[in-house]
Image (tube, helix red, strand yellow):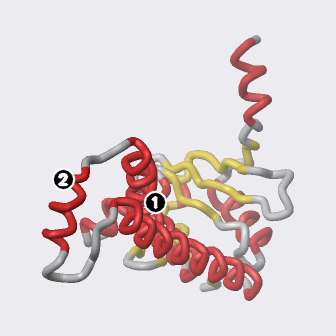
Amino acid sequence: MKHYQLSREGRRNAWLMLVGAALIWLFAIWTFQSTLGITYVPGDVGASLGTMWAEGLTVNRTVPAIFMLVLMVAAPLTMWNISMELVCRYEVAAEGLRYRAVGVDIVIPWDGIAEIRSVDADSDEPSDELILSTAPAAQIPNPLYRVLYNQAYGAKVLPVYPGVAERAELMEEIRRRSGNPVITAPMPEQALEQTQS
C-alpha cells in the first residue's frame, strides 16, 4: 500500500508556519498582559486585576486587548491545523483513501468522495479539497480531535495539501478510483460576476 506525505520542502514550509504561529501566540499573550497592565505571576493576578478594574477600561485598552484575546485563541488552533498538515499521511487502498494525522485515522470509501474541488488552481502550490458524502469525523474516537477536525476543515471536507510529495500521482489515483473529475472553484471575482448575472 503506497502512502503519500509532505515533501521535504513541504515540511520545511509547515515548520516555518508553525514557528510563525507560535511567535504570534507568544506576542499576543505578552501584549494582552501589558495592554491591560496585569501580571501573570501566581498570587499577584487577583491584585493586578483589581487595579485594572479600579483604573477603568478605556477604549485604548479594551480594543487591543480584545484583538490580542482573539489571537490567543486563534493561534493555537492554527498551530494544530499546521501540525495536522506536517504529519499527515494519505494511503491509497482498495477500500478507500486513508488519512492519518494528529489523533486522526479515517478511511474514506472511494464512492464516498462526492466531488474533487481544485482550490487556487493557478497558484504555484495548488490545493484540492475532497468533498465527501458523509462526515468522516464519526470515525475519530476522541471527541476533542473530532471537534478540532470539524473546526479545521468542515464536516464533509478532506484537504489534499499542496506540499504533498508526488501529489499529482495521488490526485490521479483519487480521480480514477472515485470516478470524479476535478471541479475548479471560481475565483472571488468570478463568483461575484456569476451572482450578478
Q: Nearer the viewer, residue 139 or 189?
A: 189
Q: Is 60 placed above or below 168 here?
A: above
Crowd rating for badge 1 (residues with CA inside 10 Å; few <14, some 14–19, many 20+):
many
Residue at the (77%, 77%) spot, across then down: 166
Q: Nearer the viewer, residue 72 or 13?
A: 72
Q: Label 2 to label 1, Cα distance in Å?
A: 26 Å
The quadrant of the picture occupied by the C terminus is top right
SS at mark 1 in the image: helix
**Would residue 180 appear left or right of 37 to someone viewing this image?**
right
Residue, disc 1: 71
Asked if residue 176 can be seen in this view, the reply is yes
The quadrant of the picture occupied by the N terminus is bottom right
Residue at the (80%, 64%) spot, across then down: 125
Chain-order first, disc 2 or disc 1: 2
| Residue 37, x across and y down, in percent | 33, 65
| Residue 158, x across and y down, in percent | 54, 59
Residue, disc 2: 54
Q: Nearer the viewer, residue 70 or 181?
A: 70
Numbered circle sitting on residue 41: none
Crowd rating for badge 2 (residues with CA inside 10 Å; few <14, some 14–19, many 20+):
few
The disc labelled 2 sits on which kind of residue?
Ala
Residue at the (24%, 58%) spot, across then down: 52
**Would residue 85 appear left or right of 50 to someone viewing this image?**
right
| Residue 144, x across and y down, in percent | 28, 67
Picture quadrant where residue 173 is located:
bottom right
Q: Nearer the viewer, residue 127 or 34?
A: 34
